């Protein structure tokens, strides 16, 4: 669970910026988008293989 603690003097825009940064760093939105629709295991495997090929091509 992501929390942002505030003092009385803290501004709301600062708190929102901190919250967005923590959400992005935790990967919450990325995971949510990934799980929005069901993917068959074969499709997941194909996507992972394609990503590995792209990474390997970039390193060479």
Image (cartoon, rainbow, N blue to C red):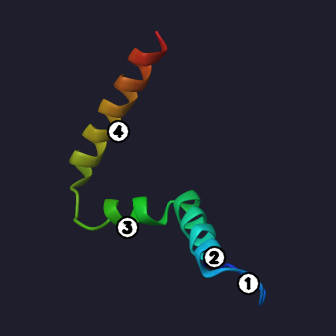
Q: In this figure, which residue is indicated by the disc labeled 1?
A: 6
Residues at discs 1 and 2 in contact (Cβ within 8 Å): yes
Numbered tag placed on residue 32 in the rendering = 3
Helix, strand or loop at label 4? It is: helix
Per the image, label 3 sits on a secondary structure element best described as helix
Query: Which circle, 1 or 3, is nearer the viewer?
Result: 1
- For residue 17, side relative to residue 30 (left or right): right
Foreground mark, 1 or 4? 1
33 left or right of 23 in image: left
Establish if 55 lies above or below 15: above
6 and 10: which is toward the camera: 10
Circle 2 sits on which residue? 15
Task: Work out how far the residue at label 1 is from the one at label 3, CA to CA, in angstroms.
Answer: 27 Å
**Residue 51, which numbered label?**
none
Residue placed under numbered mark 4 in the picture: 48
Pointer 1 or 4: first along the chain: 1
Mark with earlier residue (4, 3): 3
What is the C-alpha distance between the residues marked 4 and 2? 36 Å
């Amino acid at each position: 669970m992501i929390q942002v603690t505030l003092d009385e003097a803290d501004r709301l825009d600062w708190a929102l910026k901190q919250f967005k940064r923590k959400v992005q760093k935790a990967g919450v939105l990325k995971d949510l988008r990934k799980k929005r629709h069901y993917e068959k295991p074969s499709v997941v495997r194909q996507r992972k293989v394609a990503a590995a090929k792209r990474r390997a091509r970039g390193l060479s």
